Image: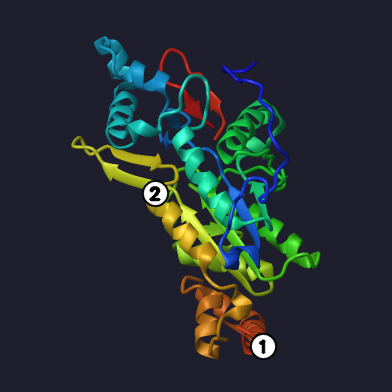
Amino acid sequence: AICGLKPSRLLPFSFRRARISPPYAAAMADTLIFLDIDGVLNVGVRDASGGPLLLSEGNLALARRDHSPEFLGAHGDAVAKIKQVDARFGDLACPGCDHFSPVLVRRFVDILRAAGPRSTVVLSSCWRRRMRGWRVKRLEREISEQLGTHFEFHEATESAEEKEPGDRLFCIGNYVAQRCASGNAHDLRIVILEDFFIAPVDGWRCRGRRIHDVSSAEAYVRRRARRAAEVKLVHCYEEWAMDSGVRVQVGAGLSEADVGATLQFLAAPPAAEKPRLGLRAALRSWFGGGCDAGARTGVREAQAMAEAAMCFSGVAGVAPVLCIQM
């Protein structure tokens, strides 16, 4: 057994057996849930000296110790950041050798229940790599226990090199485009749970397209769908400055407010039941208010107008300090 993993008998994944009653709207629509894990089901802190630091019970215990001046000279900022994050998110620390927070898993399970039986969870995290296999299995077991029935990740985005936030969004867009091209999507809802490598959404590029904010990221995914789709991006990210002026950037995990907003999104009527938008409103939804000027002209704009007129980070040990996310 890994990390105290206890075998248990679990029923096959069945909303009827689990007595889950999703909202009517969720039951009538296909839902894709793209799940990042680092920064969503755990809390990570960006550290300039290496990979992001994991908020774990072990790291908290280490940060609370008395350290020598030499140690603090080399790792003082990292220790200070962990202490600051402890004050805000200490109850979300990962226990033992697990790399997920049971509290955050429970919040994810609330979203999964609300998504209904026609939902597909797509692993978009770097945990989808083969070397993360045992961690994925351990997480699946935790989700199953909290859900009350057997759970496995259905699918994953392509195994591609991801160095920037735009790379992750591009992989998600590729999956959506392929899913829609197959003809297996209608009344599609898309929920994206991401921290984008502990980065703000502040104008980075996704294959040449400028992503200014959450709404423009959502608009990008809608464009990749090439059909009516509702998109909700939950960006699990916070930042602030310490008294020393050091910037603290945090993959803050799913907050209760994030869960509430997502449940409201899933309970809304499917796109097919909503009133059709006027042309101006449809174009605003299509472009998301954050595209480069060049993307608003020419063939792409003509195509958008035509369509609008018709309808509307795994974890590694770093000696001698803190556990990091990669």
Check residue 262 in the rendering and tell me which mark sits there, or answer none.
none
Q: Are marks 1 and 2 in contact (CB under 8 Å)?
A: no
Find the residue positioned furthest to the left.
Answer: 243
Q: Nearer the viewer, residue 148 or 192?
A: 148
How far from the left and from the top, in percent, is residue 275?
A: 55, 85
Q: CA distance from mark 1 to mark 2?
A: 38 Å
How far from the left and from the top, in percent, is residue 157?
A: 69, 48
Taking 68 as reference, is 153 left or right? right
Q: Amino acid at mark 2?
A: Glu
Name the residue tied to disc 1.
310
Q: Is residue 210 visible?
A: no
Examine the rendered structure and indicate whether residue 25 appears above or below residue 205: below
Badge 1, how many Cα within 10 Å: few under 14, some, many 20+?
A: few
Q: Amino acid at mark 1?
A: Met
Name the residue tied to disc 2.
256
Task: Identify the secondary structure beneath mark 2.
Answer: helix
Q: Is residue 137 visible?
A: yes
Taking 228 as reference, is 316 left or right? left
